[in-house]
């Protein structure tokens, strides 16, 4: 299917292919069987060795391995995704089917989800901890759903929100990256294993006065708190304003999708995490990072 080139119009097919090769191998492409550098390309992604005549594929085993779309198409889609174009807008821009564009976006989000759980180093230094609830406001729900929630007494703010919203636990390295994980509830037995897995012992850990954080000192963390109930938000260097700011930013950005299916919600949450963690990169650097993710990671092989 033909499409319009917007961001790759000045690049040849060879230049785009070399960019993908560099991100996957960090060197020149060689035959996997005889290690020969004499390669003949027979299509956009497939090649043949001139010495042993064996076939190979640049994208086999990766997130792009099952795609029939060209590398140029994916390069264009990476740019659209990086610039936060909705799938409908990208489809109009590239003159392609909207479903095709959305399916490509979902593959990118699934790969981002995989990288969030794999090869992540433990946070150290000053770390902020907090939890938040994601979901639509009560007034924007459908009439039948609101009637049912009123019948059950779950239409109130605060604690009642946890029955109709998804709780998310966040860990934020001061002036650094954020890590998010959906949790069934905010309790010590749920949050403590996540903290021990993601935060190095001996780190300075700041949080609010939630009861689920009380045992962190005994585990080996330097734990200090601020009491939001008493309108205490900053006590010297102790605060969780970095993570609080992320909650507002991510929720505002997710509202632009105008409703997300429950099974896809984690993908959009991790997209917000990825965008925030790469906020200091230029657009072309973010595109190259997406290429690295989708051309190096094996599709669907990860454990949260």
Image (spheres, helix red, strand yellow):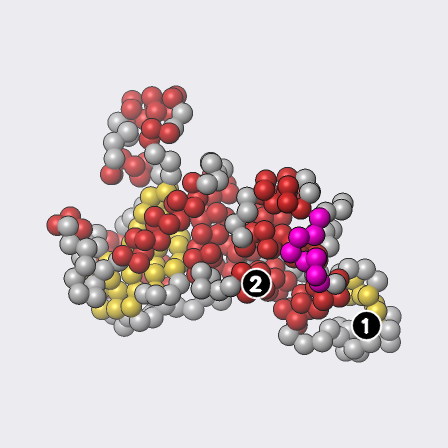
Q: Find disc 2 in the rendering and name its residue.
A: 284
Q: Find disc 1 in the rendering and name its residue.
A: 39
Q: Residue drawn at (38%, 28%), measured in percent from left and top?
A: 141
Quarter holding residue 235: bottom left
Closer to us: 187 or 206:
206
Task: From the viewer's perspective, tell me whether residue 8 is left or right of residue 113.
Answer: right
Closer to us: 264 or 26:
26
Q: Which numbered disc flags the more N-terminal residue, 1 or 2?
A: 1
Residue 102 vertical position relative to residue 36 in the rendered view, above or below: above
The residue carrying pointer 2 sits among few (fewer than 14), some (14 to 19) or many (20 or more) residues within 10 Å by Cα, namely few
Q: Report how far apart the C-alphas of labels 1 and 2 lie in the structure.
A: 28 Å
- Identify the residue at the far left of this view: 230
| Magenta residue span | 4-11
Q: Are marks 1 and 2 in contact (CB under 8 Å)?
A: no
Position of residue 73 measured from the top left corner of the image (x, y, whole percent) = 69, 53
Quarter holding residue 47: bottom right
Position of residue 283 measured from the top left corner of the image (x, y, whole percent) = 54, 60
Observer-side mark, 1 or 2, equals 2
Position of residue 40 measured from the top left corner of the image (x, y, whole percent) = 84, 69
User: In what element is the residue under mark 1?
Assistant: strand
Task: From the viewer's perspective, tell me whether residue 57 is left or right of residue 269.
Answer: right
Task: From the viewer's perspective, tell me whether residue 174 is left or right of residue 209.
Answer: right
- Identify the residue at the far front of this view: 10
Q: Residue drawn at (58%, 60%), measured in percent from left and top?
A: 287
């Amino acid at each position: 299917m033909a499409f319009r080139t917007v961001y790759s119009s000045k690049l040849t097919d060879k230049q785009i292919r070399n960019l993908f090769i560099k991100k996957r191998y960090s060197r020149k492409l060689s035959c996997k069987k005889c290690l020969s550098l004499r390669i003949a390309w027979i299509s956009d992604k497939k090649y043949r060795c001139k010495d042993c005549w064996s076939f190979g594929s640049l994208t086999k085993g990766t997130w792009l391995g099952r795609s029939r779309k060209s590398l140029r198409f994916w390069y264009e889609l990476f740019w659209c995704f990086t610039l936060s174009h909705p799938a409908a807008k990208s489809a109009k821009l590239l003159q392609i089917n909207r479903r095709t564009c959305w399916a490509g976006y979902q593959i990118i989000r699934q790969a981002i989800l995989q990288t969030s759980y794999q090869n992540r180093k433990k946070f150290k230094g000053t770390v902020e901890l907090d939890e938040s609830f994601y979901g639509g406001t009560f007034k924007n729900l459908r009439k039948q759903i609101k009637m049912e929630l009123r019948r059950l007494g779950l239409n109130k703010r605060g604690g009642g929100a946890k029955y109709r919203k998804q709780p998310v636990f966040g860990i934020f390295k001061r002036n650094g990256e954020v890590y998010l994980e959906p949790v069934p509830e905010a309790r010590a037995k749920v949050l403590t294993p996540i903290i021990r897995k993601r935060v190095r012992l001996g780190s300075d850990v700041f949080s609010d006065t939630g009861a689920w954080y009380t045992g962190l000192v005994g585990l080996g963390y330097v734990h200090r708190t601020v009491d939001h109930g008493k309108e205490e938000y900053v006590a010297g260097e102790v605060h969780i304003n970095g993570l609080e700011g992320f909650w507002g930013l991510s929720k505002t950005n997710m509202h632009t999708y105008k409703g997300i299916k429950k099974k896809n919600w984690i993908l959009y949450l991790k997209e917000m995490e990825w965008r925030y963690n790469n906020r200091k990169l230029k657009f072309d650097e973010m595109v190259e990072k997406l290429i690295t993710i989708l051309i190096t990671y094996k599709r669907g092989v990860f454990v949260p």
